[in-house]
Image (cartoon, rainbow, N blue to C red):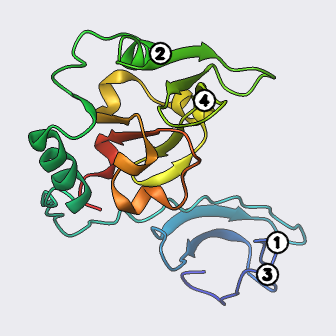
Amino acid sequence: MRDGGSASLNAAGTFVVPNLPAGTQWVSVQAIGRQAAEQAVDLKSGEATMVSITLEPVPVTLDPVRVTVAPRSIALKEFEERRRLGLGYTRTAADLEGVRTMRAVFTGAPSVRVERARGGVGDFQILIDSPGLAGQGWCVASLFIDGFKARFEQLSGYQPTDLIGVEIYQRVSSAPLQYQSTASGCGVVLVWTKYMEGR
């Protein structure tokens, strides 16, 4: 109270100031991180008066934020180097302009067949006619997204506009060394998205 006692809020957010004289009193409420508030209260002798006061948050001014563009990742540079050397089958973001679906990204690639996945696992899977695999013929490729082993259903979370590039290797032995050890005996598909830049 401006001219009387003081009190602290309890856990329920209420307070009691006893033994105040009748008449108009000013209640001032303060809290850390909130704007202080005042309110006039008319007190009557022998009666309790309820007061409800809401404290608005104090606006916080943040320091200016400087955004810098991270350098293109090493993995992306390696992709561009392999494309320049003609290793594997590659498609860049420029090649994918106008492509509307993820299935279409891989449709038409040499020795590649895009098929609907069985058992409800994703929308499609990529099969590769991998030479040298006795008795296998067409087999499901090993998929890596931004350098990490992935499942084909994960591709449904992307659109062609999210991609920087795609690499397809008909044989595991022709894929980059870092993907050979965790790949199956079939070919390898590498998908690079714009979200991996700067890693």
Badge 1 crowding class, 10 Å Cα cut-off, few under 14, some 14 to 19, many 20 or more, is few
Circle nearer the N terminus (2, 3): 3
Which of the labelled discs sits on residue 12, or is there none?
A: 1
Q: Residue furthest left?
A: 84
Q: Which residue is mark 4?
A: 139
Q: Residues within 10 Å of mark 3 (few under 14, many from 20)?
A: few
Mark 4 vs mark 1, foreground winner is 4
Q: Residue at x 74, y 73 (%)?
A: 22
Residue for badge 3 = 10
Q: Is residue 34 left or right of residue 134?
A: left
Q: Furthest-bottom residue in view?
A: 5
**To which residue does mark 2 refer?**
103
The three-letter code of the residue at mark 1 reads Ala
81 relative to 142 in the view: left or right: left
Name the image quarter holding residue 52.
bottom right
The reply to whether the C-beta atoms of the residues labelled 1 and 2 are less than 8 Å apart is no
Position of residue 55 measured from the top left corner of the image (x, y, whole percent): 55, 62
Q: Secondary structure at mark 4?
A: strand
Picture layout, residue 179 above or below residue 60: above
Q: Which of the two discs, 4 and 3, labels the residue nearer the N terminus? A: 3
Query: Observer-nearest residue: 125 or 181?
Result: 181
**Which comes sooner in the sequence, label 4 or label 1?**
1
CB under 8 Å between discs 4 and 1: no
Quadrant including the N terminus:
bottom right
Question: What is the crowding at mark 2: few (fewer than 14 residues within 10 Å), some, or many (at least 20)?
Answer: some
Which quarter of the picture shows residue 164?
Answer: top left
Distance of mark 2 from mark 3, alpha carbons? 62 Å
Residue for point 53% across, 25% down: 126
Label 1 vs 2, first from the N-terminus = 1
Among numbered discs 2 and 4, the one appearing first in the sequence: 2
Q: Which amino acid type is shown beneath numbered disc 2?
A: Arg
